[in-house]
Image: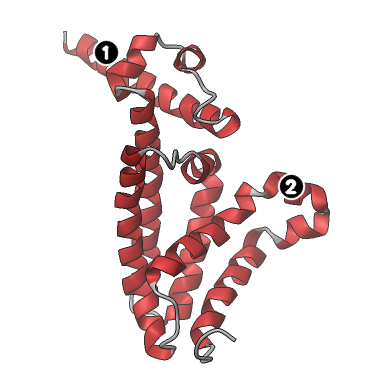
Amino acid sequence: MQKKVKQESEGKASSRERILGEAVRLFASKGFGSTGLRELAAAAGVNLAMISYFFGSKKGLLKEILDQFFSGYLDVARNDLAGPEPLPVKVRRFVRGAITYFENNRDALLVTITELPHDDPEILAHKASWGRQMVEIIEQEICAPAQEINPDFPPALVICPLLTSMMSARFLFSPVTNKIGAESAQLGSGDAYVEYISAMVLSGIIDTKRGPS
């Protein structure tokens, strides 16, 4: 009896993960609005009722994808920005960790960044709840120390989306940049990409000019 219960539990967990995995793939390639639940159920090898059972709705499925992605991203920020090291060391470590995380979760990144129905208050509020947590980490670990060096360094509400956009640009625009030429693709990869972004952030801390030029 216990073996049967265990098998059923493992089967449900497997079905749930297949639904999530196929949803990320389909939402990234076709878009949230263009992906039907019947198509998703067929791709995941489950019946339509299983999607409702696990996630309630298509919107609930999107929220779960957002939760998993942002939870991992926040873990990277908390771990890589913590510690007594100098700010440049922590910034470079965070940029490297975030880019590696994005690399390993490309489809989820694409869904998270692009599939945001801006006219949907529920999705906006859900996204904002995660955004506030990231802003708090960036404020405490980057902006507050940076503003001690340069009082004109922007607040976290500016730096957080700007930094995320820079780090994710490599993956969002790679289909285009890869066709521009081998040189541009090489410049936007690996250690070079980490250093370019880190240098831009750190130069903003060191620059003591007051206000826009």
Colouring used for the render: secondary structure
Give the percent coordinates (x, y) of residue 96.
Answer: 52, 62
Q: Residues within 10 Å of mark 2 (few under 14, many from 20)?
A: few
Answer yes or no: is residue 45 visible.
yes
Q: Is residue 10 visible?
A: no
Picture layout, residue 80 above or below residue 4:
below
Q: Amino acid at mark 1?
A: Glu
Q: Is residue 179 above or below residue 186?
A: above
Residue at far left of view: 1
- The percent position of residue 131, horizontal first and vertical second, equals 35, 55
Residue drawn at the location 29% of the way across and 50% of the way down: 129
The alpha-carbon separation of the residues under discs 1 and 2 comes to 45 Å
Establish if 25 lies above or below 42.
Answer: below
Amino acid at circle 2: Val
Q: Residue at x 71, y 44 (%)?
A: 175
User: Residue 176: which numbered mark, if any?
Assistant: 2
Looking at the image, tell me whether mark 1 or mark 2 is earlier in sequence order.
1
Residue position for label 1: 8
User: At x 64% / y 60%, what residue is drawn?
Assistant: 190
Compared across the picture, whether 48 is left or right of 213 comes to left
Pointer 1 and pointer 2: residues touching (CB < 8 Å)? no
Q: Callout 1: 10 Å neighbours few (<14), some, many (20+)?
A: few
Between 66 and 122, the residue placed more toward the observer is: 122
Q: Locate residue 89 relative to residue 186 in the image: left or right.
A: left
Label 2: element kind? helix
Where does residue 46 sit, x and y in percent of width and height? 41, 11
Give the answer, above or below, for where 47 lies relative to 142. Answer: above
Look at the image and tell me in which quarter the N terminus lies: top left
Q: Quadrant of the C terminus?
A: bottom right
Q: Secondary structure at mark 1?
A: helix
Dividing the picture into quadrants, the one containing residue 152 is: bottom left
Q: Residue at x 34, y 71 (%)?
A: 139
